[in-house]
Amino acid sequence: MLPTPDTSHVPYTLVYEPAEDSFLLLDTLSSPSEVSFLSSHFSPFPATTTTISSPRSQPQGAPLVLEVGSGSGVVTAFLTANAGRLFGHAAVLTLSTDVNVFACSATAKTTTRACAGEGERQRSSGTTDGDGNETENDAGPGAYLASLRADLATPFLPGSVDVLVFNPPYVPTPSVPRRMEQRGGPPPRGGGGGGGGGEKKPGYEEEIYLLELSYAGGDKGMEVTDRLLDSLPEVLSPRGCAYVLMCAQNKPQQVRERIRRWDAGRDDSNNAGNNGARWMAETVGSSGKKAGWEKLEIVRIWREFGKVGDK
Amino acid sequence: MKILTLNFLTCAVKACKSSAASYPLHPQEVELAKDEMEYNPQAMLNFLLRLDWAALRMTATELGFATLPEEMPTAEDLQQDELKMRQLHELLLETHVVSGKLVCGNCGHEYGIKEGIANFLLPSHLV
Ligand SMILES: [Zn+2]
């Protein structure tokens, strides 16, 4: 069991508190099958190889990991602090987005703290781990690049994300809340939405709004998830994969079948579609019904390339 | 926001994605700070292999850092040049943007950065 990052500093009236769904993501991403998938799919670039093709057409080397809707930051912190154990090497870049600026600050803090703690553990345990065969460099934390305030993955360069993780607002509701400034609130200040920071003390109305953002999924609970799924062919690198959490009411089986029918040949992301690529979607983690939670599952979505023999 | 971040970002406006002018975004009026981070040569090499060198060169120049060579050094060169590697480590992973803005070269939209967090939410007329 890898340690769960500490989120005791997070203001839970403004930011979603880690819960059953967050912990299912941590358990799934650190399960033996996913560790095996991640470490074989994103193995480090061999240091002896000197030929480098354009990284934009076929990324290699360090995987870029993006958590969308990071909330408290518990998942981003977990992925970053444990990068060495999950990917088999510490050459992992992580980023996070959230529309809630309080969540952006919380994620940055949770991740920085978790990595500092992990670095500390690495140093005190010397250059090998318990098995005595991993070097300090391999087991250490990855590099957390930025906490961004954004809608889903919209500011990312097409074809750039290698691992996308999303714990969406998945509860069916009559509608998804509209942005505060789009429903008659004060307009954003300065050239284009002011800064990312600017944490004024929020009123009660804003607290309700931020809470709704974290769970209200609209029709079938899928309005936000569908927008994210639609963006995957563009934003994922050819080798990229996504982990998306769904609840039973989202009808995950139908979603998986729909993804498998996507045409990998339509992707404009460079040369991904031309060698027998097809879209895959499998459930790689699930929780049973317990204590008021309905069944949750984590679906992994990725492209499989026919002949190349990628796992 | 670490400098390396800029290598993976573009304008959030959908119509800008296909325009070469939208990448990389141009940092303006930025305040920078430095946080030390452990230097890991093997990881650093993998980070370098992951990035777009031409875009990094542009970003570094615009931020006022010494101009990087036109061609990305080969992995072999880098492994023999620890000084160069450490300089890149400092620029890409230790230097971060505290405040300022990022400007799209295509549509001119400005994304503000405050307290290290860039805001990519678009006003409703651009969504
Ligand atoms: Zn633009």
Image (cartoon, grey):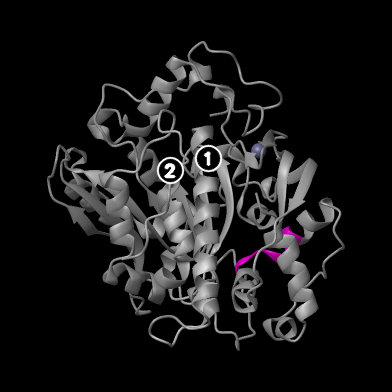
Is ligand 1 within 8 Å of the beta carbon of the residue shown at mark 1? no
Considering every residue shown, the one lying at the far left of the view is: A289
Residue under label 2: A8
Residue under label 1: A104
Considering every residue shown, the one lying at the far front of the view is: A124
Q: Disc 1 is attached to a residue of which chain?
A: A
Q: Camera-side residue: A216 or A102?
A: A102
Quadrant location, ligand no. 1? top right
Q: Disc 2 is attached to a residue of which chain?
A: A
Q: Is residue A35 above or below residue A45?
A: above
The reply to whether label 1 and label 2 mark residues of one chain is yes
Amino acid type, callout 1: Cys
- Is residue A142 visible in the rendered image? The answer is yes
Circle 1 packing at 10 Å, graded few (<14), some (14-19), many (20+), is many
x, y percentage for residue B36?
A: 70, 61
Q: Residue at x 34, y 43 (%)?
A: A18
Amino acid type, callout 2: Ser
At numbered mark 1, what does the secondary structure look like: helix, strand or loop?
Answer: helix
Q: Residue at x 33, y 36 (%)?
A: A169
The verdict on residue B54 being magenta is yes
x, y percentage for residue B102?
A: 71, 41
Circle 2 packing at 10 Å, graded few (<14), some (14-19), many (20+), is few
Q: Which residues are magenta?
A: B50-56
Q: Main secondary structure of the magenta part?
A: helix
Q: Is residue B59 left or right of residue A281?
A: right
